[in-house]
Amino acid sequence: MVEIWTETVLNDLDAIADYIALDKPEAARPLVQRIIAHVEELAIHPDSGSKPAELSASRYRQIVESPCSVLYRCEGNTLYIVYVMRGERQLTKALLRKREPGKPK
């Protein structure tokens, strides 16, 4: 399975790591490594993530690597990483719509 990480998602991950590094510089890199490893596991078990309650009727799933959530979807043999966010941030359809290709921003 091919993983697609958009530049926006990678920027989200960088911003989260930078924020964590302000208080705990030694914790930022291991968090990013855990998130990447967890996403790589999805190539083997793409349906292992849960359906977010906010989007239960959608094609999206999420995995949690505390304190973050990773929102993704599978299409054929491709795994699209759509969003990486801190757990306390509320996921909304409007936030997700901004990340979808071909949708108005």
Image: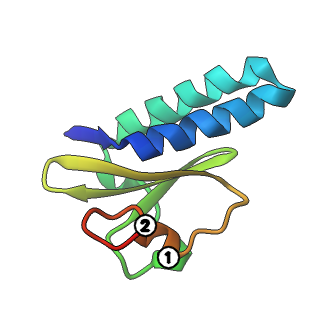
* Residue at horizontal 27 percent and vertical 62 percent from the top: 101
- Left or right: 99 in relation to 76: right
What element does badge 2 sit on? Answer: loop
> Cα distance, mark 2 to mark 1?
7 Å
Q: Nearer the viewer, residue 94 or 41?
A: 94
- Left or right: 27 in relation to 53: right
The residue singled out by tag 2 in the image is 98
Q: Nearer the viewer, residue 85 or 46?
A: 85
Amino acid under disc 1: Ala
The residue singled out by tag 1 in the image is 94
Query: Could you say where residue 29 lies in the image, as x and y percent from the top left?
Result: 63, 21
User: Which quadrant does the N terminus fall into?
Assistant: top left
What element does badge 1 sit on? Answer: helix
Query: Could you say where residue 90 lies in the image, as x and y percent from the top left?
Result: 65, 68
* Residue at horizontal 33 percent and vertical 64 percent from the top: 100
In this rendering, the count of numbered labels is: 2
Amino acid under disc 2: Lys
Tag 2–tag 1 contact (CB < 8 Å):
yes
